[in-house]
Amino acid sequence: MDLLKVLRLEESKLLQVFNKVDGQLKAVRTAINALASNSSKPYASRSHKLKGRKLSAAHRAAIKAGIARAKKAQAKA
C-alpha cells in the first residue's frame, strides 16, 4: 500500500477520534504535505518569479498600500 494512502487513512481516523487538531494530527498532515509536495524545490520560493521584471505602477502602489496597512496594524497592537 502506498505510504501516502496510509497517512491519509490515519489522518481520517484521527479526525474521527479527535474533533480538535491534535499534535498527532498535525504531525500526520505535515508528513502528508512533505510527501505530496516536490521536495527538490523550497516550499515557498517566489523570489525569482518577478526577478528582472519591472512592476507596473498599480502593482507598486498595491505593495506600498499593503505595507502601510501592515505597519498601521502593527502600531495599533
Image: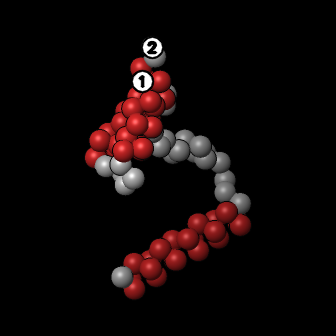
Image spot of residue 74 (x, y percent)? 39, 78
Residue type at numbered disc 1: Val
Image spot of residue 15 (x, y percent)? 42, 44
Return the residue at label 1: 6
Image spot of residue 33 (x, y percent)? 44, 35
The answer, for residue 71, to whether it is visible in the render is yes
Report if the CB atoms under discs 2 and 1 are less than 8 Å apart.
Answer: yes
The vertical placement of 75 against 56, above or below, is below
The vertical placement of 69 against 59, above or below, is below
The answer, for residue 30, to whether it is visible in the render is no
Q: Is residue 35 left or right of residue 62?
A: left
Return the residue at label 2: 1
Q: Nearer the viewer, residue 58 or 9?
A: 9
Q: For the view shown, which residue lies furthest in the front direction? A: 17
For label 1, count other residues whose C-alpha is less than 10 Å away and answer few (under 14), some (14-19) or many (20+): few
The vertical placement of 20 against 49, above or below, is below
Residue type at numbered disc 2: Met
Instruction: Name the residue at 45% across, 37% down.
Output: 12
Instruction: Name the residue at 31% across, 49% down.
Output: 22
The vertical placement of 59 against 18, above or below, is below
